[in-house]
Amino acid sequence: MSSNNDQIAQAERRFGVRFPEDYRHFLATEGSMARFVPPADDFLMINGVSELIAVNEAGDFPARFPGSVVIGGDGSREMLTYDFRQEPPPLVLLDVSAQDWSSAIHQAASFSALLE
């Protein structure tokens, strides 16, 4: 098993989830990204697998948003987050100052759709 695959498995165990296959593939191949994406050319940053645990613990996201796994953001206040309370888990945007799920903005149904 490659180092990336080991890290992916470790993160999945830590969060008690299995990441969607398209996101697992991204982590195993590209690993991370920071770029402007269409259609509005919004800035999008996807954290590398080695950063996932630290990012989620630093923001206390598991306590404020049970079932969440933050995978990236806009480099400012909005965090790109999987909502594992649902199957399949959609991607949502959460403001870093939000206290609970009520302020989540549904973004994309899948990781692949986000990058199209």
Image: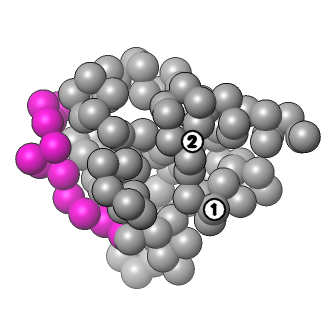
Q: Amino acid at mark 2?
A: Asn
Whether residue 72 sits left or right of residue 104 in the image: it is right
From this view, report whether residue 108 is shown above or below residue 96. below
Q: Which residue is mark 1?
A: 21
Q: Is residue 4 magenta?
A: no
Residue 77 picture location, percent across and down: 28, 40
Whether residue 1 sits left or right of residue 51 in the image: it is right
Q: Is label 1 in a helix, a strand or a loop? A: helix
Whether residue 79 sits left or right of residue 45 in the image: it is left
Dot 1 crowding, Cα within 10 Å, few <14, some 14–19, many 20+: few
In percent of the image, x 89 and y 40: which residue is there? 2
Q: Which residue is mark 2?
A: 47
Residue 7 picture quarter: top right
Q: Say how many tags the image has.
A: 2
Q: Where, quadrant-wise, is the N terminus in this rendering?
A: top right
**Disc 1/disc 2 C-alpha distance (Å):** 17 Å
Residue 98 picture location, percent across and down: 15, 35
Q: Which residues lie in the magenta part? A: 97-108
Asked if residue 99 can be seen in this view, the reply is yes
From this view, report whether residue 67 is shown above or below residue 56. below
Q: Is label 2 in a helix, a strand or a loop? A: loop
From this view, report whether residue 73 is shown above or below residue 53. below
Mark in the foreground, 1 or 2: 1
In percent of the image, x 28 and y 33: which residue is there? 66
Residue 43 picture quarter: bottom left
